[in-house]
Amino acid sequence: MTIAKRDASRKKLVGVTGRDWGQYESRGDMTMEDIWGQACTKLEQAVGPNNFNHWIKPLRLTALEDGVARFASPTRFISDWVNRHFANEIMVELSRLGPQVDRLRFEIAPKGGVAPVAAEGDAVATTAPAASQPAARPVSAAKSDLGAPLDPRFTFSNFVVGKPNELAHAAARRVAEGGPVGFNPLFLYGGVGLGKTHLMHAIAHDYQTRHPMAQVLYLSAEQFMYRFVQALRESTIMDFKGMFRNVNMLMVDDVQFIAGKDSTQEEFFHTFNALVDQGKQIVISADRAPAEIKGLEERIKSRLSCGLIVDLHPTTYELRLGILQSKTESFRRQQPDLEIGHGVLEFLAHRITTNVRVLEGALQRLFAHASLLRREITLEVAQECLADILRTNDRKISIDDIQRKVAEHYNIRLADMMGPKRARNVARPRQIAMYLSKQLTSRSLPEIGRRFGGRDHTTIMHGVRKIEELSTEDTSLAEDIAMLKRLLEA
Ligand SMILES: Nc1ncnc2c1ncn2[C@@H]1O[C@H](COP(=O)(O)OP(=O)(O)OP(=O)(O)O)[C@@H](O)[C@H]1O
């Protein structure tokens, strides 16, 4: 720190009246940097190292005056996020070191020593707003207000990579680096709770860290629709268009939501084209591949298919175990005396196969149980505590079950499900089994294709559609299918 800066920091302190600042000043050893350094040590413990490194570390305390702590922040995105999520922690820690701090003010100052410039509408936080003051929210209605907040836990470092998600992870990493990327958009799809949202947030965090001045907009397709309808209602559609078209990266989660919503699709299409034309990166997620989303306009499907489409496959035992181990390790960091009996994680990875969210929920329940009752988590404790989740997973229907039941019902060989025969008496039951696999399991079309003798996902899609069509006309087929479903779900 230069002498000039040190003096400047001191000057701020001189302006502060109050017990502790006076003390520090008289000791002559506290600059803004010193104060912030001390607060940061506590803040890192309070919010965890990930949150701290991402959000709080980039800030610089520039002044403390009249209960207001002023910060220089490299981006508005960071200041808005800090303001929404960590304002209280920061105010508490700063107040511990001196007089009460009850407001935070942020100025946007890009890294590299440029003096802070007042942002158009500083982000303001206050613990107890005076009657005349606005509520504790960012004053600015800038782009970050359009999007959804990012979950600070969803980072690349917390994402466990295995065979089922390695391609999606590699593509996400590539997009997060920025620069020219060979695929636009990146389209991530897969069943419920397999990590699509986690990867999107990880891209946003990483990209934002590498490009602090860039505008990243993450939101769900549902939010896109609400923002659009609101803009129409309030006659601010030009602002809406301007804001969406000016971001550096647009990320839309669960795009299947806009299927069948004509004007939203129209607007999405134009936004999409405008950004791609400007070379801005788009990341989209959905529960299925573009071609499978019913009610989505063909032109959107075709645009979405222009980039890289990556499927997050259902988890394998190894991936589930890896995720459980990683989550247990991070829990142990907070509670080092946590004891997990031999084979418990393996048991969970083996028995809970639906999706990662359920797996995580089960683990959290076990941890809560163990810390409240101060008991070791043994296999018996796990079985007792998770009885309901384990029962639900027991009822899970597999593609094998479906193939076997359908083959029995139509009196064909099980091998014919996988084989090449095209005769109708074999091909139709096979299509019924494909249809039931899509309906009753969370497997993706490519995964189902692999289980039907390595068929392509388009063949499965054709089979599923054929049965959907036929069963609306053919009541005996519809009854057969209903009966097979009942048998499988029994
Ligand atoms: N590979 C992974 N490593 C670590 N955590 C994971 C992984 N995959 C999923 N998770 C965790 O599982 C939970 C569900 O993931 P996420 O919300 O990303 O799923 P999703 O695919 O977006 O689901 P949905 O279709 O319901 O929106 C999250 O808490 C996420 O952190």
Image: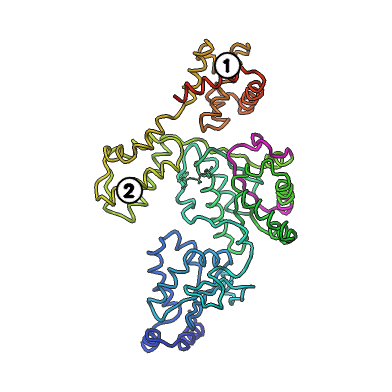
Looking at the picture, tell me which residue is in the foreground, 101 or 170.
101
- Give the residue drawn at x 59%, y 77%: 115
Within-10-Å neighbours for mark 2: few <14, some 14–19, many 20+: many
Sequence-first tag of 1 and 2: 2
| Secondary structure of the residue carrying numbered label 2 | helix
Q: Position of residue 367 (x, y in %)?
A: 33, 48
Magenta stretch bounds: 274-298
- Give the residue drawn at x 45%, y 77%: 101
Looking at the picture, tell me which residue is in the foreground, 100 or 76.
100
In the image: residue 134, left or right of residue 17: right
Would you say residue 277 sits in the magenta stretch? yes
In the image: residue 169, left or right of residue 369: right
Would you say residue 226 sits in the magenta stretch? no
Give residue 47's quadrant in the image. Answer: bottom left
Where's the C terminus, which quadrant? top left
Q: Amino acid at mark 1?
A: Pro
Q: Amino acid at mark 2?
A: Phe
Q: Position of residue 209 (x, y in %)?
A: 54, 60
Judging by the rendered image, the residue that carries numbered circle 1 is 429
In the image: residue 118, left or right of residue 195: right
Q: Position of residue 232 (x, y in %)?
A: 73, 56
Q: Answer above or below: position of 87 versus 182.
A: below
Judging by the rendered image, the residue that carries numbered circle 2 is 367
Within-10-Å neighbours for mark 1: few <14, some 14–19, many 20+: many
